[in-house]
């Protein structure tokens, strides 16, 4: 097999990807194992309880969204079920990007103030 001058070495790229995945798995096992020892096996949002049969559905969420911030006391972690974890990241992305990936909110802006005349309405009832 001949490698062209500007073509990356496929074996080298495969090794980089393999190493990166292995390192990520080791990091996750490390903090996941610690979190499972520190906290009860309950989702921090929906309070769903877990046991050995469904423990793979319980994830470790990083409160500050930095996956490299793993203090041994667990202060940056909370256990969330898969659904609550996905929801948390969706809400984070919405607030981070103001509602969409383009930075423009798709939510309608409220223009009506239902309490604008409340004082005068209450005074008229007296």
Image (tube, grey):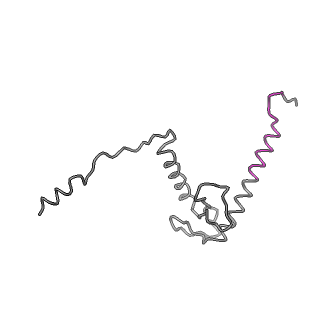
Q: Is residue 88 left or right of residue 76?
A: left
Q: Is residue 17 left or right of residue 74?
A: right
> In the figure, residue 43 lies in which quadrant?
bottom right
Frontmost residue, 13 versus 125: 125
Frontmost residue, 8 versus 77: 77
Task: Report the number of discs.
Answer: 0
Frontmost residue, 38 versus 120: 120
Residue 50, x across and y down, in percent: 59, 69
Residue at coordinates 20% horizontally, 53% vertically from top-left?
Answer: 117
Against 83, residue 107 (above or below) is: above
Residue at coordinates 60% horizontally, 72% vertically from top-left?
Answer: 40
Q: Is residue 10 magenta?
A: yes
Residue at coordinates 57% horizontally, 62% vertically from top-left?
Answer: 80
Residue 115, x across and y down, in percent: 25, 54
Give the main secondary structure, helix, strand or loop, of the magenta stretch: helix
Picture quarter with the N terminus: top right
Picture quarter with the C terminus: bottom left
Against 113, residue 54 (above or below) is: below
Q: Is residue 99 left or right of residue 22?
A: left
> In the figure, residue 74 lies in which quadrant?
bottom right
Residues in magenta, as a range: 4-22
């Amino acid at each position: 097999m001949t490698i062209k001058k500007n073509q990356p070495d496929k074996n080298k790229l495969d090794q980089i990807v393999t190493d990166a995945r292995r390192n990520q798995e080791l990091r996750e096992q490390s903090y996941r194992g610690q979190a499972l020892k520190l906290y009860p096996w309950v989702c921090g949002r929906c309070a769903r309880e877990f046991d050995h049969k469904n423990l793979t559905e319980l994830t470790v969420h990083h409160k500050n969204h930095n996956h490299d911030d793993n203090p041994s006391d667990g202060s940056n972690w909370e256990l969330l079920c898969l659904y609550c974890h996905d929801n948390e990241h969706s809400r984070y992305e919405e607030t981070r990007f103001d509602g969409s990936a383009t930075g423009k909110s798709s939510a309608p802006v409220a223009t009506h103030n239902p309490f604008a005349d409340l004082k005068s309405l209450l005074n008229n009832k007296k």
